[in-house]
Image (cartoon, rainbow, N blue to C red):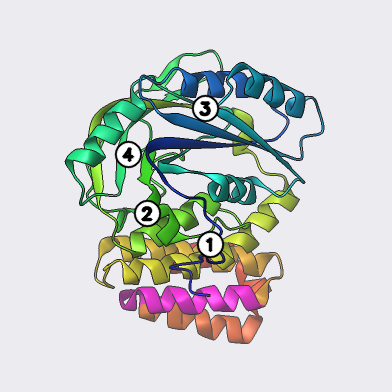
Amino acid sequence: MSPISDAGAPGEESAVVENLVTTIIPVYNRPQMIVKAVNSVIAQTYRPIELILVNDGSTDNTGEVLEQLALQHPGIVRVLHQQNSGAGLAREAGRLLARGQYIQYLDSDDWLLPGKFATQVAALRRHPECDIAYGITQLVNESGEVVNPRSKRTGERHDYLFPGLLVDRWWHTHTPLYSRQLCDLAGAWPKQRPEDWDLEARMGAHRARLIYCDTAVSCHLDHDSDKRFSRGNREAYLRDEAWFLPRLYDCAIAGGVTAQAPEMEHFSRWVFMRARHLGAIGETELAQCLFELAARASPRCSLKMRIAGLLSAVVGWRTLGRMAGLWERLSS
């Protein structure tokens, strides 16, 4: 199936309720944090709203906490329990239950500011040609201090997701508010990481237009511990990226990005680096596939790519991947 659609089976989505905003929160073993996230949705000045909490196979008392939240907010909060499947599939389960004309995704450790829905729904109504409204996300530490009032590039105005998505995922999962129409068009959340980046790339392939709201709309909790990967997790993530990067490229091309764009050259260097990393862990076939993608993405790097291709034929991708100094000189 084309990565530009990845649609679920026809008829899976719920009927749309006009003006309703649906928030979907996947939860795994966060009984304390989820309360703050839920309260931030309930505190929205906008109505009507609904909130779908997806318990992704929690092994503690998270499921009980979610049921209590549903009892406290009848008619708004719904709870879905499922086996542990990861954040992407948990969000997908929530998406299929959603009834809102607008869709909000939120992680269980982050929260929304009270005027988010009112601001972003109003922006989408003023600009019916747009399917995504986004605003400023603040980066907050575990002590509650704002460490960056404009996290990532959420303080910048962009009209489209591409070409920026080729360089970085320049906002957070909770920064945008989506039209239901666009969510249905983009289709299903994947299991593989980075699942949110992949979904947004498919939205970008459809050239969805953005409307920027120059105000703070959400807060992202900065976890220092999340920045450290174990070796096994890092290798699994590299394999997921090998699945994701060709999809990102295809979506960028569909979204109108040309080989001459500076973002495409950045992307080529990124893919080239990941090919080396995969070679170093013995994933030689994946390394070769990404090498070919890197060469295709940026013809200007063709000489360096040819040198790397010749070396890989002589010494193999595992050896070449471990020759870090030589590789860095080739990719600089």
Quarter occupied by residue 84: top right
The amino acid at mark 3 is: Asp
User: Sequence order check: which comes first, mark 1 or mark 4?
Assistant: 1
Task: Please state if 85 lies on the left or on the right of 312 as rendered.
Answer: right
Distance between the alpha carbons at the discs numbered 1 and 2: 14 Å
Q: Are marks 4 and 3 in contact (CB under 8 Å)?
A: no
Where is residue 43 drawn, in percent x and y? 44, 17
Distance between the alpha carbons at the discs numbered 2 and 3: 25 Å
The amino acid at mark 4 is: Arg
Q: Quadrant of the C terminus?
A: bottom left
Callout in the foreground (2, 4): 2
Q: Which mark is residue 181?
A: 2
Q: Residues within 10 Å of mark 4 (few under 14, many from 20)?
A: some
User: Sequence order check: which comes first, mark 3 or mark 1?
Assistant: 1
Where is residue 288 drawn, in percent x and y? 57, 78
At x 69%, y 20%, the residue is: 68
Secondary structure at badge 3 equals: loop
Q: Viewer-proximal residue, 29 or 224? A: 29
Secondary structure at badge 4 equals: loop
Q: Is residue 251 magenta?
A: no
Q: Which mark is residue 3?
A: none
Q: Which mark is residue 11?
A: 1
User: Sequence order check: which comes first, mark 2 or mark 3?
Assistant: 3
Q: Main secondary structure of the magenta part?
A: helix
Q: Residue furthest left?
A: 126
Where is residue 302 drawn, in percent x and y? 37, 80
**Residue 27 visible in the shown view:** yes
Q: Which residues are magenta?
A: 285-301
User: Sequence order check: which comes first, mark 2 or mark 4?
Assistant: 4
